[in-house]
Amino acid sequence: MTKLWGGRFQQTAEEWVDDFGASIHFDQALVLEDITGSLAHVQMLAEQSILSRSDAEKIMDGLLTLQEKAKNGELTFSVAQEDIHLNLEKHLIDLIGPVGGKLHTGRSRNDQVATDMHLYLKTRTEEIIVLIEDFQKQLVSQAEQHIETIAPGYTHLQRAQPISFGHHLMTYFWMLERDKARFQDGLKRTDLSPLGAGALAGTTFPIDRERTAELLGFSGVYENSLDAVSDRDFIVEFLSASSLLMTHLSRLAEEIILWSSQEFSFIELSDAFSTGSSIMPQKKNPDMAELIRGKTGRVYGNLFGLLTVLKGLPLAYNKDMQEDKEGMFDTVQTVTGSLKIFAGMIQSMTVRTETLEAAVESDFSNATELADYLAAKGMPFREAHDVTGRLVFYCIQQGIFLKDVSLATFKDYSSLIEDDIFIALAPREAVRRRNSLGGTGFEQVGLQIQKAKALL
Ligand code: ARG
């Protein structure tokens, strides 16, 4: 089939070669952005008297027809036209005749595709920010119900100190808050218009780049035409922010998986976010959390894929850059899906308050309380640590916990210990008293939640 750029060619490529070079298989996802970009371009061409009003109107009518068809899924695309840009131009010419060929005046596919990508990523990033907030709301709402639920806190996955379960959940709120800020910051650089950069050098036509930027809702333009068509750093930033977000989701996914195991039994996921086994009738698997943990890998892969594509490219456009798309589309889909699933999963999970609270009754996670108790009575902390360590060893030998030790025995280890030790050792007290700024004390968690709500 003849190509829109076929003038200087004597031979045509075989279909399978075209197929390898084509991007229409995936860049058709940019169909609406491409039409939007063209509409702004042609309007500017008319305003600048580069095209006559009547030509511009014909082109705009044609583009609006194509837009309608695209929305209804009525446009067909062909590999012979390589990509979304040439497919649409061909459709336009078929629809309105040779005047359609005037659309590409003062423009190249290089600034066109970069414009499409900026438009696409800008809206998708804005949508992702909203989804992060939806998920944050679910975290805050669960956390608020569990400010006073005592749970084991871990380091090295060993019981460390009792904490408020709400405090634990709120950790993810703040991680997501920083993720949101990274996406918002990336938006500043996505919100720039490359349109009008031409193939690389600008154009001889008296175009108005600021006008097209304004028509497209961009807050500024790229200052250098080579830069405008050469870099994909705005996508790298998006993939990087997505990778960190997925890291956070993956860590929570891992906790959800552990917590819903029979060994922990801290939570139960709703049936709506679990799956069964084809052989073992008793199973209820946390598949969605596992899948999100797994999908984190593909997002990292997309980031590294694009960084690697870009690292050796001379200026300006190179066909390698066509490889920027699938990883970006895939990441948008993965991040969007993961956030939606997580919001539902957290909202519908049941927290087993009694199991959590029972857990801290039968462990040594209150050992720091004893050490702090002694330190508060004037014993150097290092010494208090040692006395407590020896008492823990004594308990292990006796098969008891610190709360079961008699006052007489406590006194054998230190005469500073009085009978108020039993209050100090209670996990609920241990949590309540951690009232330092940002600590797990109920009052602090309450304040933290107030601050979080003010941000939403
Ligand atoms: N399909 C191409 C891409 O995605 C569009 C730009 C083509 N430009 C060119 N000079 N071949 O990168």
Image: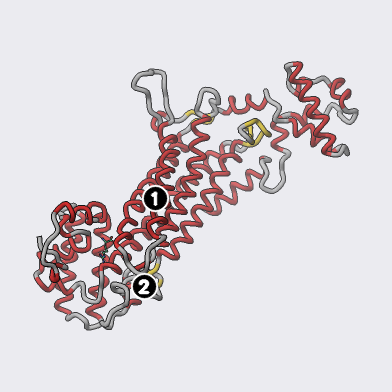
Q: Is residue 16 left or right of residue 365?
A: left
| Residue that protrudes farthest toward the right in the picture | 415
* Ligand 1 quadrant in view: bottom left
Residue assigned mark 1: 302
Task: Locate residue 18, reporting x and y percent.
Answer: 18, 56
Quarter of the rendering containing residue 100: bottom left
**Tag on residue 226?**
2
The residue drawn where x is 16% and y is 68% is 5
Q: Nearer the viewer, residue 48 or 428?
A: 48
- Helix, strand or loop at disc 1? helix
Residue pictured at 66% horizontal, 47% vertical: 438
Give the residue type at disc 1: Asn
At 77% from the left and 31% from the top, the residue drawn is 424
Residue 319, picture quadrant: bottom left
Which sits in the foreground, 186 or 11?
11
Q: Using the rendered image of the protein, determine whether residue 326 is visible from the camera's viewpoint.
A: yes
Q: Give the residue furthest to the top.
A: 398
Is 374 in front, or is 200?
200
Q: Is residue 78 left or right of residue 359?
A: left
Q: In front here: 132 or 199?
A: 199
Label 2 Cα crowd, 10 Å radius (few <14 / some 14-19 / many 20+) = many
Visible residue check, residue 75:
no
For residue 59, side relative to residue 396 (left or right): left
